[in-house]
Amino acid sequence: MPELPEVENVRRTMAPDLLGRTPSTVRVGLAKLVRPTPQALSAGIRGQSISQVDRHGKLLMLRMSGHGTWAIHLGMTGQVIIADRRPDAKHIHVTVGFDDGGPRLYYRDPRQFGFMAWCPDQAALDAGPLANMGPDALGIPLEVFLERVSGKGGKLKSVLLDQRVLAGVGNIYADESLHRAGLHPLVAPKDLSQAQLTALHHHLQETLAEALAKGGSSISNFVDAHGRPGTFQHAHRVYQRGGQACNECGCEIERIVVAGRSTHFCPHCQKEHF
């Protein structure tokens, strides 16, 4: 957490508040969260306006008018908050003010797995925050999806979680997409037919789109840039529903561990052996 739908909702809610504005002050309370240094970030973004707010996978990218990109990764518990005054909350580690005196950007991260990075050019962005990221999972063409996934060994759930294969899919949306596609998390992609992988592509896109429409999933502390939680967690079919009845067949949802991650599936709807 947060995954692609959550980060995209942050992007959509922060963009109108940031586009065209020029950072003027950067205050960093925890230097280890800023790459390469707080001084580099401050020198890089001050005096340049924000011309675009993009996203790739789970990475936010604020493109600056002159040169360079201000990248933000939310990690597990990161939040970008746009507000007129400092939120009444702990763990706010970066505050960015703007020359128009309007709402500031606050970066909050209780568990400190996220980061900000200043990338002076595209080469630095590609070699740094975007290194080893595959194509974005949202809207990936079927033919590209098949090229990246089909023929791979190992467990299907592990492949979906591998950011080098697809950028943006995490634990929630891997479990939810696999259930909708009727595929067991332990099967190997190489053992699946093109029709099965095509169905997985369809259900992955469907799941991501529905999650986006509902503001993402607020399992822990996720909120968008205006502090609003998502509601897709109420539509989860299997994720964190171990021991409960499957909404499709009534069978008890099981929990196992795959690639070190809790994995939830229905043994009736998602058979391991065909």
Image (cartoon, rainbow, N blue to C red):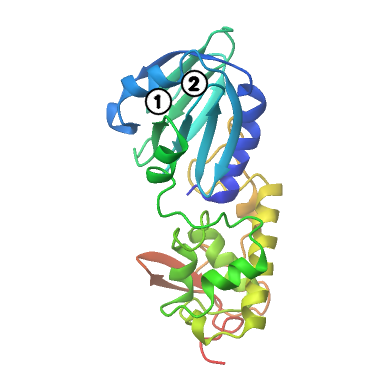
Quarter of the image with the C terminus is bottom right
> Residue 239: in sight, yes or no?
yes
- x and y percent of residue 177 in the render? 60, 67
State the SS at label 2: loop
Q: Are marks 2 and 1 in contact (CB under 8 Å)?
A: yes
Q: Residue at x 40, y 25 (%)?
A: 92
State the SS at label 1: strand
Circle 1 residues within 10 Å: few <14, some 14–19, many ≥20: many
Residue 87's disc number: 2
| Residue kind at label 1, given as amino acid type | Ile
- x and y percent of residue 262 in the render? 42, 65
Q: Nearer the viewer, residue 89 or 82?
A: 82
| Residue kind at label 2, given as amino acid type | Pro
Q: Residue at x 63, y 72 (%)?
A: 200
Residue 131's disc number: none
Sequence-wise, which precedes: disc 2 or disc 1? 2
| Residue topped by disc 1 | 92
66 vs 235: above or below: above
> Residue 245: in sight, yes or no?
no
266 vs 36: above or below: below
Q: Residue at x 47, y 38 (%)?
A: 122
Q: Is residue 224 left or right of residue 29?
A: right
Circle 2 residues within 10 Å: few <14, some 14–19, many ≥20: few
Q: Is residue 186 left or right of residue 13?
A: left
- x and y percent of residue 38 in the render? 32, 23
149 vs 72: above or below: below
